[in-house]
Amino acid sequence: MNILLFEKLHAEGLIGDASLKKIKAGNASKLLSLYWELKTLLYLGVLLLSGGIGILVYKSIDILGHQVILSFMALVCTVSFFYCFKKRLPFSLKQVASPNAFFDYILLLACLTFISFIGYIQYQYQVLGNHFGLATFTPMLVLFFIAYYFDHVGILSLAITNFAAWAGIAVTPAKIMQDNNFNSTAIIVTGLLLGILLIAAGFLTKKRNIKAHFQFTYTNFGTHLLYISCLAGMFKFESYFLLWFLLLACISYFFYNKGVKEKSFYFLLILTIYFYIGLSYSIIRLLFDIAQLDLSGVYLVCIYFIASAIAFILFLIMMNKKLKTL
């Protein structure tokens, strides 16, 4: 509110003292925004509803029967999608605002119900046989289409998650899945490739201006996949952990430049955490394996963690100040 304007009107005698006093009092007590609180409650409501459907299926499967449960899930999914298609705004390659406050949440409910429906029908009736990859590939395509068609970042996150699940299933032998042992070289390499692919997708998304606001989501998933896969390789291939640490350092250097260029403290925080884990693992391995320290090595490790924790905090403080001055 422009108080100077009202003071000028008061000086010209257009408004009285009482009115000016009320205006200043109203401006002093600004309204408290509940935007994020309401969004959180609405998203939580959708997740609770979809979770409630799952509990209903589990508790009442013997009473209701598979056909009734599937029909109910299909009805919720169909009605929700029908509402979204009816209320949607025209498609655009740029960001499109939601037509109303409830649109995003109903679309999220439709997609979560759709995923549950596909998973349930595959589990119960094996409509796709043992083709587990196809059971994740189909929802993935649908979710990517919906994310772009309706411009929904949350659905894009679901699509990327399905993409990662499909890629993991596609390269994982059935025996590994049955034994629940995912310490596989193929999965680590797949994670690295997926991370690079998602980061490249984010770069092209922004460069080609095709839903440019999706860049962060792609890059965020790609960053975590790259780092987790790199750390997994470091832990699995113990004899070559220094080579994996070198790869980790190169990835960290890339995201350091990216974080400084985009003034993103988030990416600087992420790279610092992952790099600290890799650095700590490497130093401890060197202390105990190469130097072959005895009990005194434990004290050196304790000193290292105290000193490195302080350096960790000081680095983040320094980077935060640096980003503010850019």
Image (cartoon, helix red, strand yellow):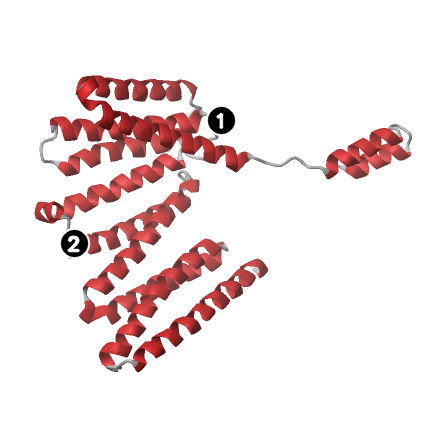
Q: CA distance from mark 2 to mark 1?
A: 43 Å
Name the quarter where the C terminus is drawn: bottom right
Q: Residue 225 in the image: state x and y as whole percent.
A: 30, 52
Question: Residue at coordinates 23% horizontally, 80% vertically from top-left?
Answer: 290
Question: Foreground residue, 271 or 24?
Answer: 24
> How many residues crowd mark 2 within 10 Å: few (<14), some (14–19), many (20+)?
some
Tell me which numbered mark, 2 or 1, is placed earlier along the sequence: 1
Residue for badge 2: 186
- 166 sits left or right of 250 in the view: left
- Camera-side residue of 210 and 276: 276
Q: Are marks 2 and 1 in contact (CB under 8 Å)?
A: no
Amino acid beneath label 1: Ala
Residue 239, numbered label:
none
Q: Residue 95, how many percent across, how many down? A: 46, 35
Q: Is residue 229 above or below residue 246?
A: above
Instruction: Identify the residue shown where x is 39% and y is 71%.
Output: 305
